[in-house]
Amino acid sequence: MVMKKLTIVLTCILSFSYASAASCVDLKSGLARGMENANVLAMQNFLFEKGYLQAKPNGYFGAGTFAGVKAYQKSLGFEQAGSVG
């Protein structure tokens, strides 16, 4: 339940940050280490802009993205799983 809420929160934030319409979008799958796709890149861009990701976003969910997700989860008071969804 906590991870589902984080997915909704994160996708809403991403939607407001990167889309012209103020609507939420649903990630079609969870995001975890080793994945590489446009959803990872969008999440990385958000984390980078907020200061949770130090490396330049590249679409690959590696160690830096894992640490950034955990830091963001911690800031929201969520379980620090390091994955989304």
Image: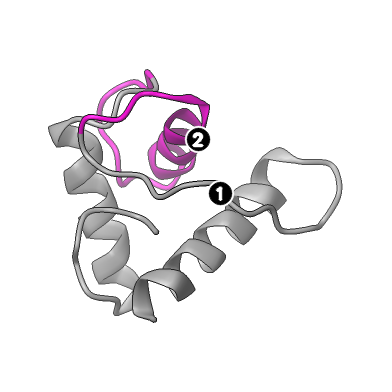
Q: Mark 2: which amino acid?
A: Asn
**Residue 53 part of the magenta-drawn span:** yes
Q: Residue 16, percent across and down? A: 70, 52
Give the extent of the magenta segment.
34-58
Q: Residues within 10 Å of mark 1 (few under 14, many from 20)?
A: some
The mark that comes first in sequence, 1 or 2, is: 1
Q: Residue at left 48%, top 42%?
A: 46
Q: Is 59 placed left or right of 83 in the picture?
A: right
Does residue 46 belong to the magenta stretch? yes
Q: Is residue 1 left or right of residue 65?
A: right
- At x 27%, y 53%, the residue is 83
Is residue 32 found left or right of 43 in the rendered image? left
- The quadrant holding residue 66 is top left
The reply to whether discs 1 and 2 touch (Cβ–Cβ < 8 Å) is yes
Q: Position of residue 56 (x, y in %)?
A: 34, 20
The residue carrying mark 2 is 39
Decide if residue 59 is on the left or right side of residue 77.
right
Quadrant position of the N terminus in the picture: bottom left
Label 2 packing within 10 angstroms: few (<14), some (14-19), many (20+): many
Question: Residue at point 36% right, 79% down?
Answer: 2
